[in-house]
Image (tube, grey):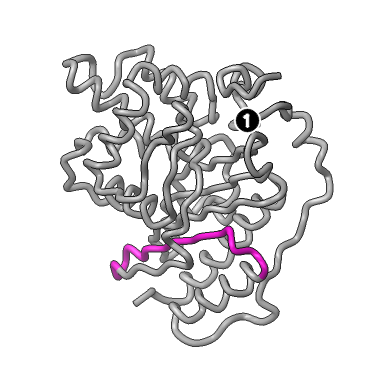
Amino acid sequence: MTDNPLTTLRFARRTGLLALGAATLAPAVLAGCSNSPTVPTPTASPTGTIREQLQATLEAIAAGNDKLGVAVEDLRSGAQWDFRGDWASQSASMAKPMLVSMAMRKARADKLQQPLPPEQAAQAEKAIRNSDNDSAEALWEWTGKRPAYDALASDLGLKDTHSAPERDFWSWTWTTPNDQRSFLHQLVKGGIKALTDSERTYLLGLMGQVQDDQTWGVGAPHSASVQVQMKNGWVQFQSTDKLWAVNSIGHVSGDGRDYLLTMMTRVATFDLGKAYCNAIGDWVFRILGSGELH
């Protein structure tokens, strides 16, 4: 099989999995991974300020892994913290909220039905809720692909977020945890020119309805009393370093918490990346439940 992302899309439909390279990993490969890997975690609960606890926790989890970045914003205090927040990697399906944003901007500019015409609305719902790749590709094509993506990133002030010159493909777009945190902040808090309030509300609504088996990472600690608006992304870059980009972004609120969390990894297997995201999601939830970040 050629190294063609559109060819791969047809095999990876409705899975969020984009194995870009000479061979395609089908969903069954993931389903067959029965032994969940473990990642380093703190041997004892960290102490000190919330900031110190977050730092100690991420230093423990990231031990030996330099391809991992995390960014947090506590919306209760407005304070921010990051661990390698400017580390850049490719978006994978984490780009799909940007794709839906691009589509809404085009619909508004073309004076079409708001926030999206019926066909694009159905594609947006599948892209976010089910991580459907065919729908994401259709939105990418409809909105104008790389120029529209880069224009949105510029209007949002995301200085390290851009399309990939080597691939006119949404999964290959580059970003950082800090930029994704900024994107989420603008989605949740509003007051921006790039998207209207109704567009923000529409997208966040979709991000609050992600199918259950895709709520790992930021969504790992969610419950009936905790709401999560999120999107994950995972892709193996077979044509380059053979590693998986496994990413998770979202807004968590409830049980006295209100925060944004973005995390990006690049690891040997999907299951390992998922384990990193789950560990970080659980620890951040635990730490921010004990006090505010300042």
Q: Position of residue 195 (x, y in %)?
A: 22, 37
The reply to whether the magenta stretch includes residue 75 is yes
**Picture coordinates of residue 243, whole percent (x, y):** 66, 45
Q: Is residue 97 left or right of residue 93?
A: left
Q: How many marks?
A: 1
Residue type pointed to by label 1: Leu
- Given residues 169 and 97, the one toward you in this image is 169
Picture quarter with the N terminus = top right
- The percent position of residue 68, horizontal first and vertical second, equals 56, 59
Query: In the rendering, at what x and y percent does residue 198 appear?
Result: 23, 34
Residue at horizontal 48 percent and vertical 76 percent from the top: 290
Which image quadrant for residue 66? bottom right
92 within the magenta span: no
Instruction: Classify residue 66 as left or right of residue 81.
Output: right
Mark 1 residue crowding within 10 angstroms, few (<14) / some (14–19) / many (20+):
many
- 229 relative position to 150: left or right: right
Asked which secondary structure carries label 1, the reply is: strand
Please name the residue shown 51% across and 76% down the image: 55
Q: What residue does disc 1 label?
A: 20
When the figure is inspected, residue 121 is found, relative to residue 251, above or below; the finding is: above
Q: Which residue range is magenta in the image?
A: 64-78
Residue at position x 63%, y 39% from top? 240
